[in-house]
Amino acid sequence: MRADLLTSILSDLNGSSAEIEASAVISTDGLMMAAMLPAGMDEDRVGAMAAAMLSLGDRTAQELSRGDIEQVLIKGDNGYVLMTHAGDEAVLSILAKPSARLGLIFLDVKRAAESIAKVI
């Protein structure tokens, strides 16, 4: 039931913008809770990397007196990876195209993260 609700939220998020290519909800310890990833992408690996990056971002923000972390953004030649907390126990991670309009993506991701936090 909970997995179905999370998958529904991810489906809505992916459908909100053609610039979002994939999304996943991952527990803070790296376990995949729900995902809409491209074929061939290893869910376990994605989960572990997302949890590690968010943890490192948390620690960096604390060490540099930046307060609580809101998100981690990675920009590469082929697009963006955006990770944000979805409550205390989960991370929402998305993959976006290089042409993505980040302002709209941030807004959609924030709304989805709030919905996920309510489900979890």
Image: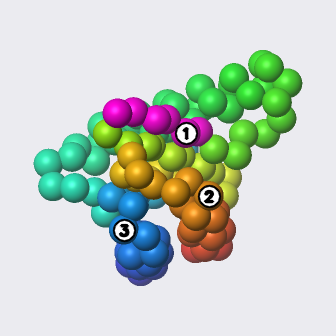
CA–CA distance in space, label 3 to label 2? 14 Å
Is the residue under label 2 in contact with that under label 1 (CB below 8 Å)? no
Q: Is residue 78 left or right of residue 80?
A: left
Of 73 and 6, nearer the camera is 73
Task: Quadrant for the C terminus, please.
Answer: bottom right
Quarter where residue 116 is shown: bottom right
| Above-or-below relation of 84 to 86 | above
CA–CA distance in space, label 3 to label 1? 19 Å
Q: In the image, what residue occupies the spot 28% across and 57% down?
A: 37
Q: In the image, what residue occupies the spot 34% across and 33% down?
A: 77
Task: Quadrant for the N terminus, please.
Answer: bottom left
Amino acid on which the number 3 mark rests in the picture: Ala
Amino acid on which the number 1 mark rests in the picture: Leu
Q: Nearer the viewer, mark 1 or mark 2?
A: 2
Of 24 and 90, nearer the camera is 24
Residue assigned mark 3: 18
Residue assigned mark 1: 73
Kindly tell me whether residue 94 is visible in this rendering. yes
**In the rendering, at what x and y percent does residue 11 appear?**
38, 75
**In the rendering, at what x and y percent does residue 63 appear?**
78, 19
Q: Nearer the viewer, mark 3 or mark 1?
A: 3
Is the residue under label 1 in contact with that under label 3 (CB below 8 Å)? no
Magenta-colored span: 72-77
Prevailing secondary structure class for the magenta stretch in the rendered image: strand
Question: Of all residues shown, which one is farthest toward the front?
Answer: 99
